[in-house]
Image (spheres, rainbow, N blue to C red):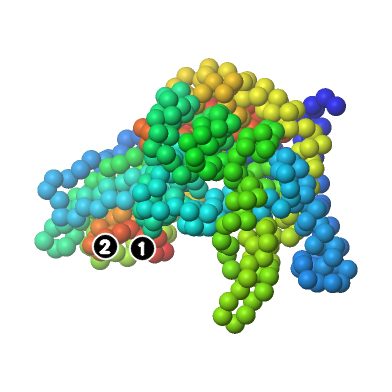
């Protein structure tokens, strides 16, 4: 089946909406959250109308159905990332919670004062702050793989850091600002050779390209449903079985236990051990539908389309006088273009683009240290997905000339 | 054309009358908006009658935050410190002459937060100051 973006756009009801009368939505903010196709909205709608019940332990028909759907979605997600077993897929609220889960359980059980954690300078706050908290509490040390001027990681510096025998290397698979795709397989292999455990922040990669956890040999991987056509409120932590089994539980409560006495408890097995309380059940069903939807189109086809769009976008953006793009060339990045524009504050750029229906993001995109590195406080970011078109890029470019007029 | 970039706002953003620093000064305070990195410092000179004799702001940020700082300082010259303490969100919206959504409101209110934290002698500028 050939990739037909106009047919795909029909799957997303919101893309037909006008932002105000006569102004069509041009949604270029997928990196923050993706739009949802009808099949995902409908799957959750049907769940609530037809099968809603709490999962596990209930023996009535609805409870059986809901439990089945919740676990079925886990199987789909496991297959999507080529996990060896669905038990390696732990439901969380989002990528942030997944990384925190590793920090609060594995890291607190395994790291001692003075132990080294390697991160990178391009991390999202969600892969910085959990480690800051741990460093303050446990006295672990943090070192950072530098980002070079072209937006790529300095792997030579990484090799040197590895000589300090880190215990953990936690890094992004794709920068949410620069779009840089990191050489994850190589970073993981080198980390393992140095005896470190790895965490991959895949929030921006799993939605856009085929990610195979077994081929990567990654120890933990975190991602969110809402950036991949699924609902908000649900994400995943993938982990290697042995690590997950040896880890202490995360939150305490219902479902994560085998047995509770007045003064003690025995934790459940993986993955329930990490899923305390009533989870996001309808959202898991939506997540499963999102994975089905993306698979039906094909991740390679989606990545190919996005590559075509970002190539075109960078080419057009470079024509705009006064505009500076951050990050590597299209060949080394995903569908993200962050830029500064002629000294005009990104908030103003974004606000004036909104007049033309163009939705972009302005700010530090939860990556303040990275912006500091480049000596700027904020950027405007346009990001693309399977439903983005070249015409939308053109609307963005025209909008930028309108921004210039206002501030002329 | 929406109102957000009314000529008066662009004018105050491009040619602010009150941009700069005062030396000496009686009150000085600065703060940032963590959402977007906007930063504003405000200096005040207060006369013997406890009225604002002069005011300046410096910093960087979007047109809304910088224009509202300029408009705000213009409006408080000659006002008593008690009057400055009584200013609120509506003051800024009236000065700008526009309605703002919750996100941009934070940009618009940054200067008022800084000003009020300064006149109250507080350690930190909080949202409650401008409610």
| Mark number displayed over residue B129 | 1
Residue occupying image coordinates x 16% and y 62%: B50
Identify whether B46 is placed above or below A128. below
Q: Give left or right: position of A276 versus B65.
A: right
* Subunit bearing disc 2: B
Query: For this rendering, which residue is in front, A273 or A231?
Result: A273
Residue occupying image coordinates x 59% and y 82%: A262
Query: For this rendering, which residue is in front, A35 or B74?
Result: A35
Secondary structure under the numbered disc 2 in the rendered image: loop
Characterize the local packing of mark 2: few (<14), some (14-19) or many (20 or more) Cα atoms within 10 angstroms: few
Secondary structure under the numbered disc 1 in the rendered image: helix
Query: For this rendering, which residue is in front, A345 or A194?
Result: A194
Where does the image place residue A95, in percent across and percent down from the top left? 59, 49
Based on the displayed image, in which of its 4 quarters is residue A52 positioned?
Answer: bottom right
Where does the image place residue A221, in percent across and percent down from the top left? 60, 44
Identify whether A77 is placed above or below A381. below
Q: Give left or right: position of A213 versus B3.
A: right
Residue occupying image coordinates x 78% and y 56%: A71
Based on the displayed image, in which of its 4 quarters is residue A382 positioned?
Answer: top right
Whether residue A38 is visible: no
Where does the image place residue A65, in percent across and percent down from the top left? 85, 62
Q: Quadrant of the N terminus of chain B?
A: top right
Residue occupying image coordinates x 71% and y 40%: A81
* 1 vs 2, front mark: 2
Where does the image place residue A140, in percent across and percent down from the top left? 38, 50
Q: Give left or right: position of B96 versus B25.
A: right
Q: Are marks 1 and 2 in contact (CB under 8 Å)?
A: yes
Disc 1 and disc 2: Cα gap in Å?
Answer: 10 Å
* Subunit bearing disc 1: B
The residue to which callout 2 is attached is B122
């Amino acid at each position: 089946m050939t990739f037909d973006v106009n047919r795909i756009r029909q799957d997303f009801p919101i893309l037909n909406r006008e932002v105000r009368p006569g102004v069509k939505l041009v949604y270029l903010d997928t990196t923050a959250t993706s739009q949802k196709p009808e099949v995902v909205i409908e799957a959750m709608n049907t769940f609530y109308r037809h099968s809603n019940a709490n999962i596990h332990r209930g023996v009535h028909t609805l409870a059986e159905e809901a439990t089945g759907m919740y676990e079925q979605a886990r199987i789909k997600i496991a297959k999507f990332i080529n996990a060896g077993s669905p038990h390696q897929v732990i439901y969380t609220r989002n990528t942030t919670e997944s990384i925190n889960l590793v920090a609060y359980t594995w890291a607190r059980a395994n790291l001692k004062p003075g132990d080294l954690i390697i991160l990178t300078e391009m991390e999202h706050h969600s892969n910085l702050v959990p480690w800051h908290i741990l460093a303050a509490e446990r006295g672990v040390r943090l070192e950072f793989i530098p980002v070079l001027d072209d937006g790529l990681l300095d792997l030579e510096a990484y090799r040197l850091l590895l000589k300090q025998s880190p215990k953990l290397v936690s890094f992004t698979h794709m920068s949410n600002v620069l779009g840089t795709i990191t050489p994850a397989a190589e970073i993981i292999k080198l980390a393992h050779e140095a005896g470190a455990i790895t965490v991959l922040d895949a929030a921006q990669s799993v939605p856009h390209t085929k990610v195979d956890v077994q081929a990567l040999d990654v120890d933990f991987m975190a991602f969110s449903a809402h950036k991949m056509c699924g609902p908000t409120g649900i994400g995943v932590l993938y982990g290697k079985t042995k690590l997950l089994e040896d880890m202490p539980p995360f939150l305490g409560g219902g479902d994560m236990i085998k047995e509770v006495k007045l003064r003690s408890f025995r934790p459940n097995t993986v993955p329930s051990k990490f899923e305390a309380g009533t989870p996001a059940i309808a959202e898991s069903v939506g997540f499963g539908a999102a994975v089905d939807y993306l698979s039906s189109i094909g991740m390679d086809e989606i990545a190919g389309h996005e590559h075509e769009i970002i190539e075109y976008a960078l080419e057009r953006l470079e024509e705009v006088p006064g505009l500076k793009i951050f990050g590597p060339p299209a060949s080394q990045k995903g569908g993200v273009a962050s830029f500064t524009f002629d000294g005009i504050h990104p908030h103003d750029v974004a606000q004036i683009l909104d007049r033309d229906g163009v939705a972009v993001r302005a700010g530090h995109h939860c990556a303040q240290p990275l912006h500091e590195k480049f000596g700027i406080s904020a950027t405007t970011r346009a990001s693309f997905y399977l439903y983005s078109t070249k015409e939308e890029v053109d609307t963005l470019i025209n909008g930028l000339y309108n921004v210039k007029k206002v501030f002329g | 054309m929406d109102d957000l970039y009314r000529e008066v706002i662009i004018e105050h953003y491009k040619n602010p009358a009150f941009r700069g620093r005062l030396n000496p000064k009686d009150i000085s305070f600065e703060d940032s908006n963590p959402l977007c990195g906007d930063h504003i410092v405000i200096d005040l000179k207060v006369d013997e009658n406890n009225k604002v004799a002069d005011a300046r702001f410096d910093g960087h940020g979007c047109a809304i935050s910088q224009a509202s700082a300029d408009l705000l300082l213009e409006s408080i010259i000659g006002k008593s410190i008690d009057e400055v303490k009584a200013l609120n969100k509506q003051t800024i919206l009236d000065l700008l002459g526009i309605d703002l959504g919750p996100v941009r409101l934070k940009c618009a209110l940054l200067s008022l937060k800084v000003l009020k934290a300064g006149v109250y002698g507080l350690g930190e500028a909080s949202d409650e100051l401008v409610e």
